Amino acid sequence: MDRGTVGSANRGRLQVEVRTEGRSEVVKPAGELDHHTAELLRAPLDEALAQGRTRLVIDCSQLEFCDSTGLNVLLGARLKAEAVGGGVHLAGMLPVVARVFEITGAEAVFTVHDSLEAALSD
């Protein structure tokens, strides 16, 4: 079920698509995730958890940039999901985004998949 796309008032720097696929809530941010756009990702993640969707798959294949604010949004979602028996899976990270997770050590606390298909079949 497709829940649509949320756009940024900041000239479309971040678009977020949300859909349910099997037991997973797939959230696909596209563009730049930073201080100015973080709420556009936080809101659908919080909404999914509020609706009882505890397995969150973040399709990062079109995420071009992620700063510390964006990383904190994902870490916060992970803590909330794990508190209710779920988790956050990251899929298809571009090298520039993967590097942020590597440098900060955050890759160690997420389940990371090479592709969305791999994350959904896990």
Image (cartoon, rainbow, N blue to C red):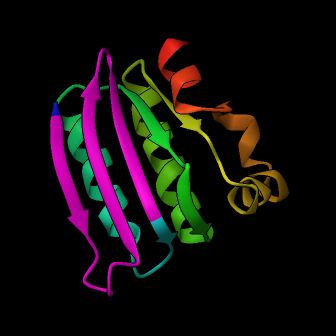
The image shows residue 104 at horizontal and vertical percentages of 78, 57
Given residues 105 and 30, the one toward you in this image is 30
Percent position (x, y) of residue 92? Answer: 61, 41
Q: Magenta stretch?
A: 2-30
**Left or right: 55 with respect to 49?**
right
Does 20 lie within the magenta span? Answer: yes
Residue depicted at x 52% and y 24% = 117
Q: Residue furthest right?
A: 103
In this rendering, position of residue 21 left or right of residue 36? left
The chief SS type of the magenta part is strand
Residue 109 vertical position relative to residue 98 in the rendered view, above or below: above
Q: Quadrant of residue 94?
A: bottom right
Q: Is residue 62 above or below residue 106?
A: below
46 and 29: which is toward the camera: 29
Q: Residue 109 placed where, x, y %?
A: 68, 36
On the rendered structure, is 59 left or right of 68? left
Front residue (pair 33, 39): 33
* Quarter of the rendering containing residue 3: top left
Residue 83 magenta-drawn? no
* Residue 115 location (% of width, % of height): 60, 32
Residue pictured at 74% horizontal, 61% vertical? 100
The residue depicted at 53 percent of the width and 70 percent of the height is: 69
